[in-house]
Image (tube, rainbow, N blue to C red):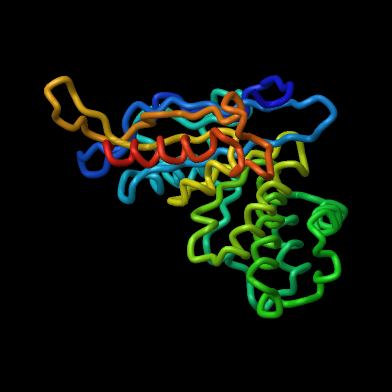
Amino acid sequence: MSEEYKKQERLLTIAQLGLQYGGKQILRDLSLTIDNIVRPGMVQGQVVSLLGPSGIGKTQLFRCIAGLQQASTGMVGLNGKNLPVRAGQVGVVFQNYPLLEHRTVWSNLALAAQQAHKATADIVKLLDGFGMLDQKDLYPVQLSGGQRQRIAIIQQLLCSSHFILMDEPFSGLDVIMKQKTVDLIREVSTVDELNTLIITTHDISTAVAISDTIWVLGRERAEDGAWLPGSTCIKSYDLIERDLAWNKDVERHPNFYPLVMEIKELFQRI
């Protein structure tokens, strides 16, 4: 089992969430939580991966968590508060890392900071922490894909403080860039104790390598074998308990590939 840790305050609550479009049930009875993980002597944020077959409702749940889509029933709440999440409270990093091309890195971040009532010192601290202070006067076109990704994450941290949703961050990447993205996610999660990343991905192996929790979205069958309407969380994996969290050499761990295969086989049934 992984080293000593404990779970403390509630950071995110998804309570009996359901979503309908035109009378069709998309999501059903989703109840999930994320707690602050504390490791003595270390700064440890949270990384949760959301997995599921294409068309199962991951994007809709993603939008509900971000406050971009209103649920039909239930709610998503932050920091233990019984208040629905609002758009802007959770940062969203999309695949193309959109930045204003006519503004410098600093100007892009200053705009985000102004909207969130953050100080110049907050921008400097984040740029320095992500090794991007020397690039502050460059324009987005002058940045590499990895640098754009870092600036997009800093931008969202300025807006939302601690919650970041990442949409398919490994899609279309070669082996080297994928590893750099994995390293960046680990870096973001350990910048602040409360930093919480939720990642949607089709890459099961990388999700197991990077996460401390995995949620699998899918459909269930009734007793007569018929599919129940709407998707729900059919399995939640605690990778800390399986000794697979916080380990850069996790792929060498004897529990790694059995879990990858277990999730792949689960996909065949949902």
For residue 3, side relative to residue 242 (left or right): right
Residue extending furthest toward the left: 224
- Relative image position of residue 112 (x, y in whole percent): 70, 58
Residue at position x 77%, y 44% in the image? 191
> Observer-nearest residue: 107 or 163?
163
For residue 133, side relative to residue 108 (left or right): right
How many numbered discs sit on the rendered protein? 0
* Image vertical order of residue 268 relative to residue 79, above or below: below
Residue at position x 67%, y 73% in the image? 144
- Relative image position of residue 114 (x, y in whole percent): 74, 56
> Observer-nearest residue: 152 or 118?
152
Please identify the quadrant where the C terminus is shown.
Answer: top left
Residue at position x 50%, y 42% in the image? 67
For residue 83, side relative to residue 44 (left or right): left
Quadrant of the image occupied by residue 246 = top right
- Relative image position of residue 133 (x, y in whole percent): 84, 65
Please identify the quadrant where the N terminus is shown.
Answer: top right
